[in-house]
Amino acid sequence: MGIPTLISTSTASDSSSIDITSGIDSTYDEYMFVFTDIGPATDTAHFAFQANAVGESDFDEYITSTYFYAYHAEDDGENSLTYNTNSDQAQGTAYQHLADYIGNGADESAALILHIFNPSSTTYVKHFYARCESNHQANYAQDNFIAGYINDTTAIDEIRFKMSSGNFDGCIQMYGIS
């Protein structure tokens, strides 16, 4: 892995979404987003992202992805490794889930890292992967693994992050990797 260079920091405070609309360009081949203390206002919300190709405005690019997670109950009563068909996409235009069923309690939030590769390419699709640790609303520690690609050969220059329902708090830092 190369050296990360901080490009921007966005702070959500009861925000419906955070849009990254500058800084994603051909300067770096890899962009890394670091999310800290992502907390939903609504219990059981899903944290997700979608992208925009240059000149577009609808955040509805085609995504193909996979999503699986491991979880362990706080009371040690249950654990599993599960493929999540509700959070993957096959050429879908929905927001791609990064964390599911996050609780909104004081001790519940999510922390994650998302990598996107070659977003400025006009030849190739844009691959991504993410890893997220979250506190499930049913008192589970949940470790999510997400990977896929944005199926567009037009450059991507905007990304939106939001909850499936309600607002959220947290910090989003964008880094370029050289």
Image (spheres, rainbow, N blue to C red):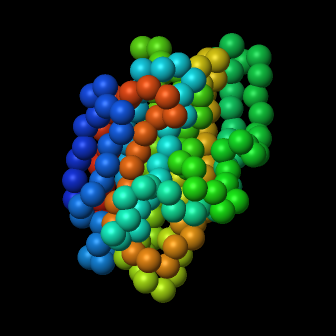
**Toward the viewer: 35 or 163?**
163
Q: Horizontal and vertical percent for residue 37?
A: 38, 31
Q: Horizontal and vertical percent for residue 154?
A: 44, 77
Q: Horizontal and vertical percent for residue 17?
A: 36, 39
Q: Residue at x 54, y 66 (%)?
A: 150
Q: Is residue 84 above or below residue 80?
A: below
Q: Horizontal and vertical percent for residue 52?
A: 41, 62
Number of marks in the rendered image? 0
Left or right? Give the position of 77 relative to 66.
right
Left or right? Give the position of 37 relative to 132.
left
The C terminus is located in which quarter?
Answer: bottom left
Q: Is residue 178 above or below residue 82?
A: below
**Toward the viewer: 115 or 2?**
115
Q: Residue at x 77, y 41 (%)?
A: 82
Left or right? Give the position of 131 relative to 12.
right
Q: Is residue 165 above or below residue 11?
A: above
Left or right? Give the position of 141 relative to 109.
right
Q: Residue at x 55, y 38 (%)?
A: 99
Q: Is residue 1 visible?
A: no
Q: Is residue 166 visible?
A: yes
**Toward the viewer: 88 or 105?**
88
The N terminus is located in which quarter?
Answer: bottom left
Q: Residue at x 43, y 39 (%)?
A: 162
Q: Quadrant of residue 151?
A: bottom right
